Image: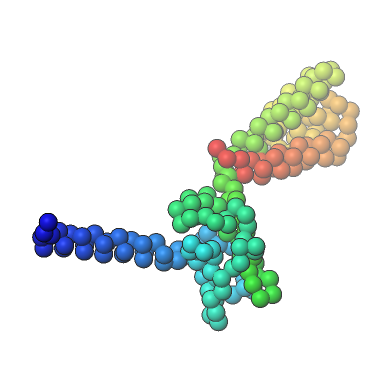
Amino acid sequence: MSISSKSILSITLLAATCCGLSAMESEPLQICNDKVYAKSDLGEFSLKHDRKGFIVEDKMASRRVQNCFVDKDLRGKSREELTRYLAHNYVAVKQMSDTYKITGEQRLDGSGPIGFAICYWGTKVILYSSAGAAVLATGGAAGGALVAAGAVTAGVAGVAAGASVATGLTVAETAAAIAAVESTAAFVGAWGLLLPF
């Protein structure tokens, strides 16, 4: 059997292509700065990952991080697995005397203003409705209507005055109750920012 020059050329090109791919895979993966968290006193550095693990490069040296200082969720990941992990998470780097510690951290993707609005107004509706129902149950129909209407339109002073007439509480006590409802709604709304939708 004789081998033609075309066969030799195609085998050579195939070998060169395969060697090029394996060389490219052995190049360390540069992890983007937006996927890395570190305290500012750590200074400028870059974080890389290859088959053996993580490498921290700063102005003075390049240091390989021992696997015992790498979070178990990140240890032994391939280039593709780490890329998928970093799509929704980030890596925290902490300096420990002469080495570094690397941990994987989850990024909380919240719902933003929509979640805040839903939780904030939902809490207000529930709390003011139950307050209005309590006033109505105690016989203060006019005060209950003022509480329900004033919560949206008249503001705290009008609501406090109307509710105090119906419940017998002072205006200051009623205003304090309304302030508690408002602060509770703001607190629940702030947690609504974190809810994933």
In the picture, residue 102 is in which quadrant? bottom right
How is the rendered protein coloured?
rainbow
Kindly tell me whether residue 154 is visible in this rendering: yes
User: In x, y percent, where is residue 195?
Assistant: 61, 40
Q: Is residue 103 left or right of residue 147?
A: left
Give the vertical position of 31 relative to 138 (above or below): below
Give the vertical position of 145 relative to 4 (above or below): above
Q: Residue at x 81, y 23 (%)?
A: 135
Instruction: State the count of labels.
Output: 0
User: In x, y percent, where is residue 6?
Assistant: 11, 60
In the picture, residue 37 is in which quadrant? bottom right
Q: Residue at x 68, y 71 (%)?
A: 96
Which is more toward the observer, 36 or 146? 36
In the picture, residue 99 is in which quadrant? bottom right
Q: Residue furthest front?
A: 1
Which is more toward the observer, 180 or 24? 24
Q: Residue at x 85, y 39 (%)?
A: 172
Give the vertical position of 74 relative to 19 (above or below): above
Q: Is residue 178 left or right of residue 74?
A: right
User: In x, y percent, where is residue 40?
Assistant: 62, 71
Q: Residue at x 59, y 75 (%)?
A: 43
Position of the N terminus, as image quadrant, is bottom left
Which is more toward the observer, 115 or 141? 115
Give the vertical position of 141 relative to 119 (above or below): above
Which is more toward the observer, 67 or 142? 67
Position of the C terminus, as image quadrant, is top right
Q: Residue furthest bottom?
A: 60
Q: Is residue 9 left or right of residue 16?
A: left
Kindly tell me whether residue 83 is visible in this rendering: no
